[in-house]
């Protein structure tokens, strides 16, 4: 993954330098390795999406997710954000005996959730988690009240619609579906159409079980990503949009901290990988109609997003990356004890947002890695 243009990177570094200091020292304050006030910003991984549905994994034949409730109660004041007290932020606050202010909200992107209000389908999910620092608009007063010494951010997967991409690939489109694929790629928000197509093709566990085996892939491969992946993933990656959002957020967090007299340490997480590796079995219903080639390619996309984050924040003062990409190793899809919800939950509830999100055990594994990073045992 190539780095950002030198001019852009230089401007960002100058802005950060103006905020004062480097590393964990800034504005006369030293941030200790053990945080006392944690703020969490981010998307569904940070909110704990999926957990409160209460699904359990059936280990008989065929393996699948079962049980659960269609309308769970979530933590916090904003029920549409799907926050769980078993999310990694809550676990970290307990481990450090720290205060916690978590503003994470499912589906959040930089523009739709972090800098501006999180909205979807005409509904307000929650006001902006951070706000637009450049214009001083929609600033989250609760963020300032928290007086964070540590800000943890999980961001990017929804900016490139990663859950939609996986669901799209798992539907098993062929070249005969080229017109529909191009239609999806042209939609402003393709998620609803992608989900509807998947549940129409696989409305039940029986439909998944009886699916014919595909011997080759038409889309979602390195040879032919298809227009959906080109528009949803590669366009924002290659344009530098995702990288610039990471840098803009770092700049804003540090500037806001400088004004408050306490510049917090910033920790970005990467993303877990729910998909089985090349040597692992792909014989399970949670993969939908994904072939081995498609799995390998979508795994590589997770790596590309991670490289984009690391390239963007590398060398920026006060920033650390907690790499959780291997947090679920041995507990991916098709293992006997997966720590991430699979597509079979859609046979229970077609509107569930749980697929691809960590279970409580998965969140514990993620929290352990972030905790280790905060204690200085790991860094980027």
Image: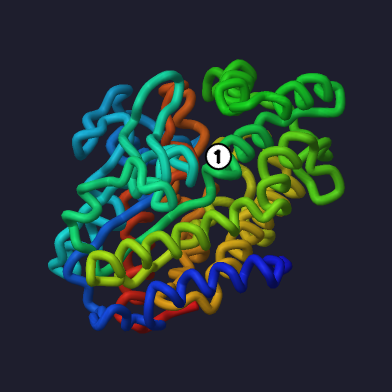
Residue 71 can be seen in this image: yes
Check the image and report above or below for 365 versus 233. Answer: below
Image position of 303 with respect to 346: above or below = below
Q: Badge 1, how many Cα within 10 Å: few under 14, some, many 20+? A: some
Q: Is residue 365 left or right of residue 32?
A: right
Q: Position of residue 150 (x, y in %)?
A: 28, 67
Q: Is residue 107 above or below residue 299?
A: above
In the rendered image, the quadrant that contains the N terminus is bottom right
Looking at the image, what colour scheme do you see? rainbow
- Quadrant in which residue 95 is drawn: bottom left
Q: Position of residue 173 (x, y in %)?
A: 76, 28
Give residue 17's position: percent from left, percent from top: 46, 77
Q: Residue at x 38, y 35 (%)?
A: 117
Closer to the camera in the image, 176 or 114: 114
Q: Which residue is mark 1?
A: 163
75 over 200 or under it: above or below: below
Q: Residue at x 35, y 26 (%)?
A: 124
In the image, taking residue 365 as reference, residue 193 lies left or right, namely: right
All told, the count of numbered labels is 1
Estimate the x, y position of residue 265 in percent, counting from the top left: 33, 72
Q: Is residue 47 visible?
A: no
Query: For the point 45% across and 30% down, which residue is it?
Result: 345
Q: Secondary structure at mark 1?
A: helix
Residue depicted at 44% across the width and 47% down the height: 340
- Return the residue nearer the eye: 298 or 120: 120
């Amino acid at each position: 993954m190539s780095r950002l243009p030198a001019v852009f990177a230089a401007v960002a570094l100058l802005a950060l330098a103006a905020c004062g200091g480097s590393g964990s020292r800034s504005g006369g304050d030293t941030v200790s390795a053990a945080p006392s006030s944690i703020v969490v910003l981010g998307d569904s991984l940070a909110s704990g999406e999926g957990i409160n549905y209460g699904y359990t994994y059936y280990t008989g034949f065929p393996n699948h997710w079962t049980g659960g409730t269609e309308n769970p109660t979530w933590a916090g004041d904003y029920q549409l954000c799907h926050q769980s007290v078993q999310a990694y932020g809550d676990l970290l606050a307990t481990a450090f005996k720290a205060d916690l202010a978590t503003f994470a909200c499912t589906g959040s992107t930089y523009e739709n959730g972090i800098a501006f209000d999180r909205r979807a389908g005409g509904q307000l999910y929650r006001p902006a988690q951070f706000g637009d620092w450049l214009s001083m608009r929609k600033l989250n007063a609760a963020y300032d009240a928290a007086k964070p010494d540590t800000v943890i951010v999980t961001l990017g997967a929804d900016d490139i619609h990663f859950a939609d991409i996986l669901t799209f690939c798992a539907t098993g489109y062929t070249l005969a579906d080229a017109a529909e694929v191009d239609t999806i790629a042209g939609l402003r928000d393709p998620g609803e159409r992608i989900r509807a197509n998947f549940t129409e093709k696989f409305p039940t566990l029986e439909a998944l079980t009886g699916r014919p085996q595909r011997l080759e892939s038409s889309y979602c491969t390195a040879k032919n990503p298809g227009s959906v992946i080109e528009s949803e993933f590669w366009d924002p990656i290659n344009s530098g949009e995702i990288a610039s959002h990471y840098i803009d957020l770092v700049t804003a967090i540090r500037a806001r901290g400088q004004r408050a007299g306490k510049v917090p340490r910033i920790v970005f997480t990467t993303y877990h990988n729910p998909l089985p590796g090349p040597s692992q079995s792909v014989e399970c219903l949670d993969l939908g109609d994904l072939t081995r080639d498609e799995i390998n390619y979508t795994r590589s996309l997770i790596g590309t997003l991670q490289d984009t984050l690391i390239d963007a924040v590398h060398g920026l003062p006060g920033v650390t990356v907690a790499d959780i990409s291997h947090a679920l190793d041995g507990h991916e899809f098709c293992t006997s004890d997966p720590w991430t919800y699979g597509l079979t939950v859609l046979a229970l509830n077609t509107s569930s947002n749980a697929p691809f999100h960590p279970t409580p055990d998965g969140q514990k594994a993620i929290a352990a890695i972030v905790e280790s990073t905060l204690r200085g045992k790991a860094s980027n």
